[in-house]
Image: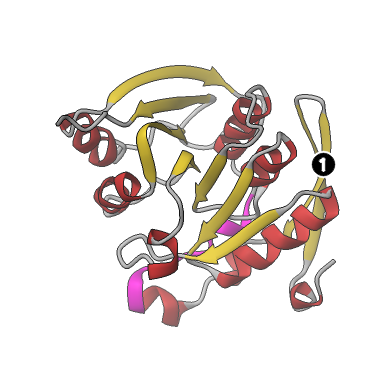
Amino acid sequence: MDDALGRFDLTTYEVVVGSLRLSITHPRSAEELIDETEYEHDERLPYWAELWPSALVLAEHLAARDLRGRRVIELGCGIGLPAIVAALAGADVLATDWYADALAFTRANAAAAGAAVQTLLVDWTAPPPELLAMPAADLVVGADVLYEERNGPALAALVPRLLAPSAELVVADPRRPHAAGLLDRLIGGGWSLSTTDVRHGGRVDESGPIVHLHRLTAPVPTA
């Protein structure tokens, strides 16, 4: 395990995704990582430190797809499970988060799985120039990224700058009340949407056992 993680109290779970059996390590308690100074600055909370049901649903979806040669970006990667699964499925993967610690865990978990995953620190409201200068992605994914009202508009502004025409955004969302902030904006911009309800077998929180798997396709520019 990465030496940078030595200051954390760690726990490791064995996760089965499709035919994959992965060991995923993360902090034992996300609550113990809450930093009041960070929260006062930008209401930041360490949601990245848990393995959420939506991440499992998204990972299962990616494991079932042929991603060989595809360029994939994960937004809000947390501890990295979907990004790792996409890489093991043959994709060229960039995992992003606005917590440096999340990226350290993603790198460590990817190394343990033998997956090649690049990482980049990204604030959705102020994306770094190197992200925007990268080749357009074939697929952008996110798991449980719509938990705050501000997230939907920020992602609706960012995602079109990352995807190629007719490329796809896939968001696994446990029916958060602010999802419309992303979906309505993209649909209004000509994106097409299909949604599948997925019943997960993981822990059930206040949102229940159903995760919405939203698949949005970018429009083709008109001449």
- Whether 174 is among the magenta residues is no
Q: Relative to 139, does residue 136 appear above or below in the rendering?
A: below
The color scheme shown is secondary structure
Q: Where is residue 38 in the image (x, y as percent from the top left)?
A: 43, 77
Q: In which quarter of the image is residue 173?
A: top left
115 or 61: nearer the eye? 115
Whether residue 171 is visible here, answered yes or no, is yes
Whether residue 128 is visible here, answered yes or no, is no
**Residue for point 31% across, 31% down:** 218
**Residue for point 37% across, 18% down:** 194
- Whether 48 is among the magenta residues is yes
State which quarter of the image contains the N terminus.
Answer: bottom right
Q: Where is residue 105 in the image (x, y as percent from the top left)?
A: 70, 62
**Residue for point 75% across, 24% down:** 18
Q: Relative to 47, does residue 51 appear above or below in the rendering?
A: above
Q: In which quarter of the image is residue 120?
A: bottom right
Determine whether the residue tagged by mark 1 lies in a helix, strand or loop: strand
149 or 114: nearer the eye? 114
Q: Relative to 66, does residue 154 appear above or below in the rendering?
A: below
State which quarter of the image contains the C terminus.
Answer: top left
Q: Where is residue 165 in the image (x, y as percent from the top left)?
A: 33, 34
Give the magenta-colored segment's residue range. 41-50
Which residue is under mark 1?
22
**Residue for point 31% across, 37% down:** 179
Q: Position of residue 66 (x, y in %)?
A: 64, 25
Instruction: Indicate the amino acid at tag 1.
Output: Leu
Specify whether 194 is left or right of 108.
left
